[in-house]
Image (cartoon, rainbow, N blue to C red):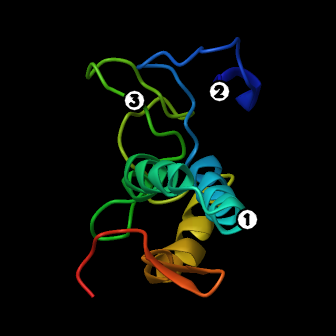
């Protein structure tokens, strides 16, 4: 997606510095991938869920849980200021605070993604201490 209008760009448009990978969108994708897996039973959806979880969701929050990214850049050159306020670090809050509140709702649900049940079969979806 693009910063301008938080809109989709052209096909395959995903520039490393300026891609607008919003934390909330990553959370929505995790929800979608889990439901697609439960519907179809294809592990490719769990692969996408895992990649999105680690690279788009939990990267949106600092280790101490007190600061957040709204967009998650694919890379940083230390100069491009990707946040709307002209910064390039996680922030304690935003004028539109959807990402922090979505993370607060999502993080406690993460253990539920480790295993999956479909058609009386148990799946280990994520490798984690449990």
Q: Which quarter of the picture shows residue 58? A: bottom left
Give the numbered dot on residue 74. Answer: 3
Closer to us: 57 or 33: 33
At x 27%, y 65%, the residue is 63
Q: Mark 1 points at which residue?
A: 39
Badges 1 and 3: C-beta atoms under 8 Å apart? no
Between 69 and 25, the residue placed more toward the observer is: 25
Q: Does any portion of residue 17 appear in the rendered image?
A: yes
User: Which residue, given by chain and number where applicable, does mark 2 sit on?
Assistant: 1
Q: Where is 22 relative to 46, above or below?
A: above
Distance from disc 2 to disc 1, alpha carbons, whole Å, reads 27 Å
Along the horizontal axis of the image, is 11 left or right of 126?
Answer: right
Specify few, some or many for label 3: CA neighbours under 10 Å numbering under 14, 14-19, or 20 or more.
Answer: some
Q: Which mark is residue 57?
A: none
Task: Look at the picture and state if 43 lies above or below 71.
Answer: below
| Distance between the alpha carbons at the discs numbered 1 and 3 | 30 Å
């Amino acid at each position: 997606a693009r910063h301008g209008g938080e809109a989709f760009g052209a096909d395959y448009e995903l520039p490393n510095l300026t891609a607008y990978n919003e934390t909330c969108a990553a959370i929505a994708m995790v929800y979608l991938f889990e439901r697609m897996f439960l519907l179809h039973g294809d592990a490719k959806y769990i692969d996408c869920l895992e990649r999105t979880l680690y690279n788009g969701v939990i990267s949106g929050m600092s280790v101490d849980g007190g600061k957040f990214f709204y967009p998650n850049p694919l890379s940083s050159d230390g100069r491009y200021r990707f946040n709307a306020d002209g910064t390039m670090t996680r922030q304690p809050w935003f004028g539109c605070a959807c990402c922090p509140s979505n993370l607060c709702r999502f993080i406690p649900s993460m253990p539920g993604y480790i295993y999956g049940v479909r058609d009386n079969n148990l799946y280990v979806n994520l490798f984690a201490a449990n």
